Amino acid sequence: MRPDQEIELTENAIAVLEKRYLLKDGKGEVVETPRQLFERVANFIAEADRNYQAGEAEVKRSAARFYGMMSSLEFIPNSPTLMNAGKENGQLSACFVLPVGDSMEEIFETNKHAALIHKTGGGTGFAFSRLRPKGSVVASTSGVASGPVSFMKVYNASTEAVKQGGTRRGANMGILRIDHPDILEFISCKENTADITNFNISVGVTDNFMEALLRGESYALIDPRTGGNYEIEAKKQSLDAATVFDLIVQHAWATGEPGIVFIDRMNRANPTYPGETIEATNPCGEQPLPPYDSCNLGSINLGKFVHKPLPNDFDLSRPESGIDFDRLGQTVREAIHFLDNVIDQNCYPLEQIERQTKKNRRVGLGVMGFADLLCELDLAYNSSGAFELAERLISFVESEARKQSSELAKSRGKFPNWENSIYARENVAMRNATVTTIAPTGTISIIADCSSGIEPYYALAFERNVLDGTRLVTFNRLLKQRLEQQGPISEAVLEKISSCRSIQEISELPDLIKSVFLTAADISPEEHVRMQAVFQKHTDSSVSKTINFPEQATPDQVRQAFLNAYEFGCKGVTVYRDNSRPYQVLSTTESSSAAAAGGGKVVERPAVLQGFTEKIRTGYGNLYVTVNLRDGKPFELFAQIGKSGYSTMADTEAICRLISISLRAGVPIGQIIKQLRGIGGASQIYADGAKVTSIPDAIAQVLNRRFEGEADTSAGTGSEICPDCSEAMNYDSGCYYCKFCGYSNC
């Protein structure tokens, strides 16, 4: 029997834990079980109770309750806590916001601080709104300013360098106020999706702008140095609101960015406003923070709180009767206790962050498994019953979380900034300035085997590569159970389910199953926004959610979603139209199309090419991979394996020749990586924290590291390829994440 036998983990969950969370020795071998992981985290976080006169027995009781929540998969903290709790200098928070001042010293000091945060697994948000506009005079040098977008590119390059050795990829949010004079350049800065790849971007939309938009008027641009109207010769002092809004809409329709944050609304809802002003959010937008603040998050798996079996008196007119609210309330209270303890146990990357975090003690308890819960209760995601139940659930979570924070304030003290908060004005004791946040939960929902955040299902079946080159289909757990209850299902029907995003057109399936098991593609944009607004109504911070559109959606439909988000009370909105991340052509459109059809013309090799050589350790020795470039793109590849025997060297040469001719024929680099990645061999090792399964796999890893921007999409599919396992990734809540290895680009 495995030590973790009683923990119900899927194969995917175990694979993700082994790759990203479980402790490893110096050789990269896993030396911790999932049970030991949860014990490590629970014991370390419970130790904070000693700060408040808890005895040994009480600390052990807390540790047991924390372990129980995690091992039952009812509550999972954010990834840095799972990864780092109990380790030396363990940084436990996921979300940070840093200020960007207008001097060169301040700009690069913040860049250094961001690098330190990324090194520890955190994500950073920045507002570039304080920076003087492009072309402004810099008195100290008699030069001209290069503007916010240029420094975003500097930060992006720094993130790219730091992320190479981390267990979590560095991620950023860049925000610029809509009244900044460089707003048009900012809106367009990710027009090429291969640029600024380590940033999500959002426009900070003000009330003044929305009022001007709705009235059909212009609005004033503000000089960030003076706070007054922008007055540089030959530069516009105002812009037409509709024109700017149309530009945002057009780019969001085309690429999914920029998103929008309603910055004034965020500040009005900020408990420490006006003493502290929010300028930015974390990378996925769900955690607005003042400068140097941080927040640690965790999510409750709602699907675990459905009564099983459902009560005899259950009916869809009262779906809440199917939920164990007593147990849910207890879990909410323990989760707030856990998250408050994290603040004390954290090792902060900067003194400024530690001071600010302990000043406000923000925590963000959210939910996941919402789509699972609805299916368990036979409720369609877009039904009136689902909207009503969503409000009932999140208002209950918010109420119980605030009650627990208030109880902690009585025994541990109010958060130090309480006197300057809305709670002081209302005379309500609180331990934490905020208690609720709805986060994406991409990776931790894989561990919990549940739907992510408050999103509907992205799809109901997923295909993945296995080592012998075949494809393995993984079906949605609840759908599989329901189908098995219906009796035998033909292979033809299973094939239909696995090959489409929606099951609505599969006539062989019962109507009840089709009406309940909806995917994001089955839900209208307005219904997506309405669900986000319902959760936002009872969430202290913000809500991470994607408003999905079919590929044929128009810019006008995107425009309406943005307007709906403002009207319904959302704090921000992110949209994504299927296949709107365009494939980056590696040579010419003609040659790439021909290659995809199998008839690419092989381009002649020039006499001179430049490139690079990278060493990677394999089970057969050190492999030296040389890639030569043409016009900055990979054109041919050579590899030298050293003293591994003639057969190994010959096989390596053959692989390289085939890769080279494919590249010269215009085959997309992403397709080549996908074919090579994960091929198994007799001598598999861990090298630099990653498993190298064979020589072809090692070559694929080198290509992936060097050409990740170009390899992001699979030709003709619009799906991003996971840089770790080469599977197709999902997009929700502003992030791409992999269902199979847990990789996330946020």
Image (tube, helix red, strand yellow):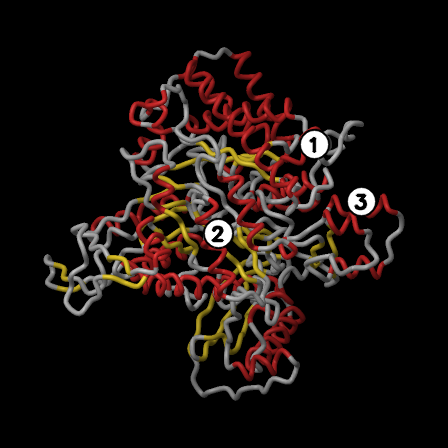
> Where does the image place residue 184, in percent across and percent down from the top left?
32, 64
Report the residue that reaches farthest toward the front.
Answer: 215
- Circle 2 packing at 10 Å, graded few (<14), some (14-19), many (20+), is some
Q: Which tag, 2 or 3, sits closer to the chain's start?
A: 3
Q: Which tag, 3 or 1, sits closer to the chain's start?
A: 1
- Three-letter amino acid code at the position of disc 1: Arg
> Where does the image place residue 323, in percent across and percent down from the top left?
68, 29
On residue 408, which mark appears?
A: none
Quadrant where the N terminus lies?
Answer: top right
Q: Label 2: which residue?
A: 564
> Where does the image place residue 64, in percent across and percent down from the top left?
60, 21
Name above or below for residue 38 compared with residue 206: above
Question: Can see residue 333?
Answer: yes
Q: Label 3: which residue?
A: 482
> Where does the image place residue 12, in percent across and percent down from the top left?
67, 46
Task: Give the residue displayed 78% in from the left and 48% down from the top.
Answer: 512
Residue at disc 2, secondary structure: helix
Left or right of 376, for residue 556: left
Q: Label 1: which residue?
A: 318
- Three-letter amino acid code at the position of disc 3: Arg
